[in-house]
Amino acid sequence: MARIEIHGGVPLQGEVWVSGAKNAVLPILVASLLGDGPSLVNNVPHLQDVTTTMELMGRMGAELSINDRMTIEIDPRSMNLFEAPYDLVKTMRASILVLGPLVAKYGQARVSLPGGCAIGSRPVDLHLHGLRALGARVEVRNGNIEAYADRLIGNRIIMDTVTVTGTENILMAATLARGTTIIENAAQEPEVVDLADFLISMGARIEGAGTNTMTVEGVDNLRSTEFSVLPDRIETGTYLVAAAMTGGRIRCTRARPAHLDAVLDKLSETGAQICVGEDWIELDMQGKKPRSVDITTAPYPGFPTDMQAQFMAMNTIAEGTAVVTETIFENRFMHVQELQRLGADIQVKGNTAIIRGVPGLNGAPIMATDLRASASLVLAGLVADGVTLIDRVYHIDRGYEIIEEKLSGLGARIKRL
Ligand code: EPZ
């Protein structure tokens, strides 16, 4: 099993380019199944989850080809199998996103029920509630979700909880329903907006993307399109935190600063100097240690839960004491024990962690448990004295494209064993 070895202590310097967003490209690739011809998706990051999604769509009979390093063409016209089997769903929960498109376009779907995962139980009840509200017959049996509909019918759906993929599943299904669908308490994440923009480019009629109320006028079919995926705001934030922790100065290019307001505000609070341009963000820590910052995660535009572990890593070596509260997932503190192995002073009480900054961390063998937790361990390794060895790095590869190359390009002493 691959491992990553880091020699800490180098302030990061230089420029790093941001890849396409994982949490936008996954629903967009799946949404291309709704089209009546081949679509082209550009700025696709090379991630394990993208490979898994392509494998899933290939098994359903779609024709996929990679035109160059970052462009995928999907032709759904040869689709002949409308299911997502357990062996793929268990490796990537986002496979649930095929449910809406399959029912809407092909009238049927069988998707393995995603089990829990490291960060929480993560039920999909709201996905199923939404599809039932659109007239689908949905059963759960033998570990599978089975859904059928002759033609979905628009409806007004109020989401009990803000759910990103739940909103995306219902949005995709509603585009081909008969009549109007209103989604209340919809997720407002930029990745939801990017999916809506992709669907609109296919001829869907969607209003209100990026607000908590989305209105969809169903159409009879959607056409081929070409689209470029937005930059990954979580990858961007992760590199900015790496620069802040190591006292360095970096510029992230091909970025979208407007999607990082909450994160940039918190980074400024740590004492970092931040400049932004049209498509770049520069952070200069001027050799200083960061000040502790309190974090409470919330749905967008609040502070993103996907940045919580990274800021916790920064707080372990910051000046002062920080309180980090995770409100989205019930068990997203798996990185705490691993950070404690490096010498961090963290106390967890329920969904709140209290982090007292320590003068420094010491390298040690540690283990990644989930995608963002593993990123926080890499960040901790960048500042720890000596060598940090991170096991189970397949978690990192799900969401960070060529992370060693990008960090080495900024001066980090990091390599994959
Ligand atoms: C998406 O997951 C992201 N994944 C996650 O990113 C991200 O952490 C999460 O949104 C929150 O922003 C993708 O977009 C592929 P949710 P998702 O449904 O949609 C509860 C990463 O690191 N809920 O918004 O699965 C759920 O338990 C990943 O890139 C229900 O109760 O998250 C959670 O407490 C990790 N019933 C809350 O809603 C449902 O039917 C938010 O979950 C659905 C969700």
Image (cartoon, rainbow, N blue to C red):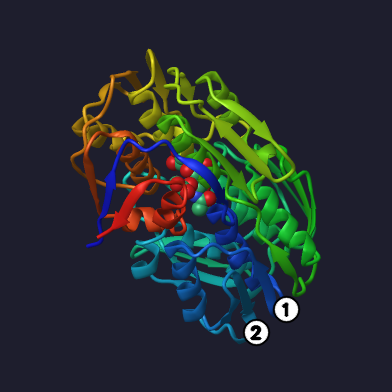
Using the image, tell me which numbered label, if any, was put on residue 77.
Answer: 2
Circle 2: element type: helix
Circle 1: element type: loop
Q: Amino acid at mark 2?
A: Arg
Q: How far across and down, in percent of the image, does residue 277 sit?
A: 72, 39
Distance from disc 1 to disc 2, alpha carbons, whole Å, reads 7 Å
Residue at disc 1, CB closer than 8 Å to ligand 1: no
Residue at mark 1? 36
- 384 relative position to 129: left or right: left
Q: How far across and down, in percent of the image, does residue 266 sit?
A: 54, 24
At 55% from the left and 44% from the top, the residue drawn is: 236
Quadrant holding the C terminus: bottom left
- 143 relative position to 340: left or right: right
Q: Is residue 125 visible?
A: no
Quadrant holding the N terminus: bottom left
Depth check: give the residue in front, 198 or 81.
198
Q: Residue furthest top?
A: 320
Q: How far across and down, in percent of the image, does residue 324 sit?
A: 41, 23
At 39% from the left and 35% from the top, the residue drawn is: 309
- 105 relative position to 393: left or right: right
At 35% from the left and 67% from the top, the residue drawn is: 86
Q: How far across and down, in percent of the image, does residue 179 sit?
A: 80, 58
Depth check: give the residue in front, 141 or 3.
3
Mark sitting earlier along the chain (1/2)? 1
Q: Is residue 392 visible?
A: yes
At 79% from the left and 70% from the top, the residue drawn is: 220
Q: Amino acid at mark 1?
A: Asp
Relative vertical location of residue 360 with respect to residue 260 in this rendering, above or below: above
Whether tag 1 and tag 2 are in contact, CB under 8 A, the answer is yes
Q: Residues within 10 Å of mark 2 (few under 14, many from 20)?
A: some
